[in-house]
Image (cartoon, grey):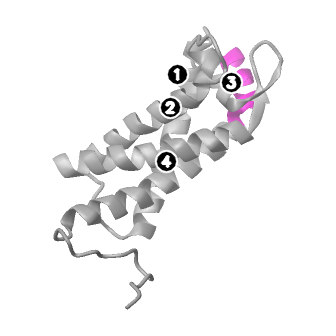
Amino acid sequence: MRQRIAAGLGAGLVAGVIFAVVMRIMWGWAPDGQHVAMTAFAATLVHAGTPRLGWLVYIVYGVVLGALFGAAPLVARTGWLRAAGLGGAWGLAWFVVMGFAVVPALLGERPLSGTALHEMVSVGGPLLVGHIVYGLVLGAAFDWILGAFGRPRGSHHTLPGFHRAA
């Protein structure tokens, strides 16, 4: 269990950084009507003083969800493709939780109210894409890191499909 949580933390860090990059590239509408990068939107949710802290929000969020992913009883080393699929489903599930309950609450709206659903229209697409990309990367990285824990020290095992030069 400890190795799975550690693998989840590491994979969450990797996936969280990629999530932050995707969210920086994607744009949505802030509650005040401004067209902003999603990292800036995240900064407004936590009342950060600067939009740059939105990067940190996504990375910390990614690490926490990664640890929870590693602790989930259904998650084990299954091969990177299946793990990526599980991660994608994990990301989709958290999109639903965050998008329809947590984000509206942070904006001062009642979850699933008409106003909350209207707010999700402006940021839902980028959040959905970001969560799915996050989940796919999380699952694949989790499987790879967990596999690295099982290899003997000094084995110098490489990624599948890659061979060491002689």
Q: 129 or 156, which is in the foreground?
A: 156
Secondary structure found at label 2: helix
Residue located beneath label 4 in the image: 15
Judge depth for marks 2 and 3 and give the one in front: 3
Any part of residue 1 in sight: no
Which badge, 4 or 1, comes first in the chain's sequence?
A: 4
Q: Looking at the image, do the residues carrying marks 2 and 3 touch, with CB atoms under 8 Å apart?
A: no
Mark 4 Cα shell of 10 Å, populated few (<14), some (14-19), many (≥20) = many
Residue located beneath label 1 in the image: 102
Which badge, 3 or 4, comes first in the chain's sequence?
A: 4
Q: Amino acid at mark 3?
A: Ala
Cα–Cα gap, marks 2 and 1: 7 Å
Q: Is residue 119 rendered to the left or right of residue 135?
A: right
Which badge, 2 or 1, comes first in the chain's sequence?
A: 2
Horizontal and vertical percent for residue 1?
17, 48
Q: Residue furthest front?
A: 166
Question: Is 116 within the magenta?
Answer: yes
Residue 163 has which mark?
A: none
Horizontal and vertical percent for residue 37?
74, 30
Cα–Cα gap, marks 3 and 4: 19 Å
Residue located beneath label 3 in the image: 40
Mark 2 Cα shell of 10 Å, populated few (<14), some (14-19), many (≥20) = few
Q: Is residue 111 rendered to the left or right of residue 37?
A: left
Any part of residue 162 in sight: yes
Residue located beneath label 2 in the image: 97
Q: In this picture, which residue range is highlighted in magenta? A: 113-124
Residue placed at 54% from the left, 36% from the top? 96
Question: Is 138 within the magenta?
Answer: no
Mark 1 Cα shell of 10 Å, populated few (<14), some (14-19), many (≥20) = some
